[in-house]
Structure formats: structure tokens, C-alpha cells
Amino acid sequence: MSQDYEKFIQNIKKKTGIDLSLYKEAQMKRRLTSLYEKKGYKDFEEYYQHMTSNQMLFDEFLDRMTINVSEFYRNGKRWEVLQEKIIPKLLGQNKKLKVWSAACSTGEEPYTIAMVLSNFMPLSSISIHASDLDENAIARAKNGTYPERSLQEVPAEMKNKYFTKDGMFYKVDDAIKKTVTFKQENLLADSFEQNYDLIVCRNVLIYFTEEAKDTLYKKFSDALRPGGILFVGSTEQIFNPSSYNFETEDTFFYRKQ
């Protein structure tokens, strides 16, 4: 690791508590180098100095670091499995589900969970905890306005029922928005609540090192009740689930033993 980047990592950790060394170095360094070069800075040191006195620059750095790529019902087939197989089983064990959308980005994921759950219960009975590292992403999630491309995989009946077209954008229905409580959270540094029935954390872990993933799987396992489910993204299979007290319930779904 170059000294310049290492110093940058230390500074960021001191300032924010975010540990960039837990992310895959080549990817993160490339992403951030292109960001500071675009702004006309010559190295990480100069970039950091300007960032500390310019909130917009700092917010942009956080945005770039947390990679907000999201859409509703992403990888639709997995959401079908959640709806047809996983949720009915969970509801057989618990009438009121404790659900967490971890690293929820701009809100598409927790709102999708709410729509799936709306097939089983009134919206007033649904309560989802959603968290992300990036305050800008959370602000956008609370706003609930999305470009059409985010809705490509939304089933037609859900689109008609829970979205209103607003110019070039779509707004999520307030009744869906009320089901989700957003909070800023650092997955690697913060402690988690306990006894979740379902934790959804998709398309985030691919950016972490193996050590960081290992830590997170342990933390997620501890946060689930026995029989609870962890739902991960389509490139994030856990190859040794039993070492985290998980067994495979379905592809990308893991049940805590």
C-alpha cells in the first residue's frame, strides 16, 4: 500500500470512524483516485486537505465510497423465493416479524421488502429497520423519489398500487414509506440489535475484504434469532455457512441454526 493512500486511510478513520482498509484495496483506491484526479488534485494528501474544509467535497467522497447502485426487486427471482417460500415459513414461527435492511443505500431494498410483506399483512403491521453509512443516501431514501430505471423489475400491480408518476420520476406511496425507519450505521464498527427474523444485506459484501466479510457474517448471525434468515446478493454466496451457525435455506438465503 502506498504511503500516500495509507495516510489517507488513517485520516479518514480518525475523522469518520470508517476504516477503508476493510475494503478491497485495488477497487477502492482506483475509485478514489479517479475522483480526486477529476477534481484536479495531485494526490490523496491534497485531496484530504481540501475535503476537510469543503463539506460538499466530503459528501461526494462518502457517496463514491458507499457505491449507491440499487433498484427495486433487484434480481426478481430471489424476491419471488422470499415471498413464496421464506416469508410464509417465518410467519409460521412469528406473527410479527423483526426485519432489517442493512446497507440499504437509497431505499429501494427496504421499500421492496415492505411491498413483499404487504402481500401477507396490512402496511400498518409492517415495521422495517433500514440503515446505511451514507447520510446522503438515507436522505434520498426518505424522499422516496426514483427514476424510471429503478422500477424495471417492479411487478405491475405493485407499481400501480404503490407508485405515483411525477414528471420523469416515480414517488413511493407514503403508506409504504411509513413502514421503514432509517438510521445511519457503520456495519463494521457499530453493534447490532438482536432477535431479527430477517436480515437483508445484498450487493455490499462484495466490496469488503475476506476478513471484514468474516466479521460481518458473525455479527449478522449473532443478530438473528435461531431460525432467522440472512438474505444476501447474487454474487455473495457463503461457502462455509456452518462456521457462522448458518445452513443454506435456498440459494442466497441462510437460516441460523
Image (tube, helix red, strand yellow):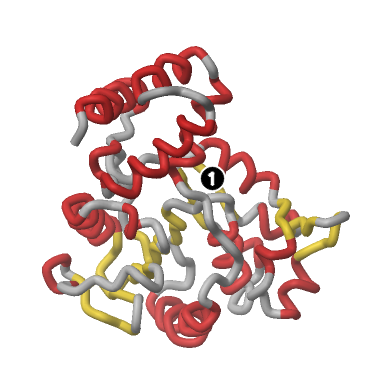
Is residue 188 shown left or right of residue 257? right
The quadrant the C terminus occupies is bottom left
- Taking the spot 30% from the left edge, 25% from the top edge, the residue there is 8
Q: Position of residue 184 (x, y in %)?
A: 46, 38
Residue 105 drawn above or below residue 115 = above
Q: What element does badge 1 sit on?
A: strand
- Taking the spot 46% from the left edge, 30% from the top edge, the residue there is 36
Q: What's the residue type where badge 1 is placed?
A: Phe
Which is nearer the eye, 163 or 75? 75
Which is nearer the eye, 127 or 111? 111
Residue 34 drawn above or below residue 165 = above
- Taking the spot 63% from the left edge, 70% from the top edge, the residue there is 115
Residue 163 drawn above or below residue 48 = below
* Callout 1 crowding tier (Cα within 10 Å): few <14, some 14–19, many ≥20: some
The quadrant in which residue 158 appears is bottom right
- Taking the spot 83% from the left edge, 61% from the top edge, the residue there is 164
Residue 192 drawn above or below residue 98 = above
Q: Position of residue 223 (x, y in %)?
A: 28, 56
Which is nearer the eye, 56 or 194? 56
The quadrant the N terminus occupies is top left
Q: Position of residue 53 (x, y in %)?
A: 49, 12
Q: Which residue is mark 1?
A: 182
